[in-house]
Image: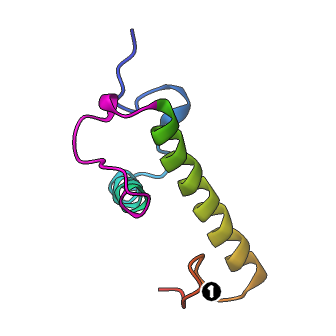
Amino acid sequence: MATNNNTGGRNRVLVQGAQQALDKFKNEIASELGIDYSGDKGNLTSRQNGYVGGTMVKRMISEVENRMAGTGQSPQGGPQA
């Protein structure tokens, strides 16, 4: 059985060094949604985990759309860093 260490399957990180940034982003999203992501993720429901992942995807798509449109705005409406 495969382990959850991102070495195979569709959940692998394609950009070397991006794992820490993705983990930080995931924790920020979970915090904004009021979900405690500090402990064992196995104690969370599929709905909670899916909500975090779905929100991450929405924000990433919004960021790319804003960059492509040249608006210079982040998804939250502030200036880009």
Image: magenta residue range: 31-45
Between 25 and 68, the residue placed more toward the observer is 25
**Which residue: 38% across, 57% down?**
34
Point out the residue furthest to the front here. Answer: 34
Which x, y percent locates residue 76?
56, 79
Residue 52 picture location, percent across and down: 48, 49
Residue 22: name its quadrant.
bottom left
| Residue 51 x, y percent position in the rendering | 53, 46
**Taking 8 as reference, is 28 left or right?**
left
Image quadrant where one finds the N terminus: top left
Q: Considering only vertical position in the picture, is 81 above or below 41?
A: below
The residue under the point 41% across, 64% down is 32
Which residue is depicted at the point 46% across and 39% down? 49
The reply to whether the magenta stretch includes residue 35 is yes
How many residues crowd mark 1 within 10 Å: few (<14), some (14–19), many (20+)?
A: some
Q: Residue furthest left?
A: 39
42, 74: nearer the viewer: 42
Task: Name the kind of residue labelled 1 in the image.
Answer: Gln
Which residue position holds label 1? 73
Q: Residue furthest right?
A: 69
User: Coloring scheme of the render?
Assistant: rainbow
Name the main secondary structure of what is drawn in magenta. loop
Left or right, residue 53 beside residue 33:
right
Residue 59 located left or right of residue 1: right
Q: Position of residue 48 (x, y in %)?
A: 46, 41
Q: Nearer the viewer, residue 13 or 75?
A: 75
Q: Secondary structure beneath disc 1? A: loop
Check the image and name the residue furthest to the top.
1
Q: Is residue 54 magenta?
A: no
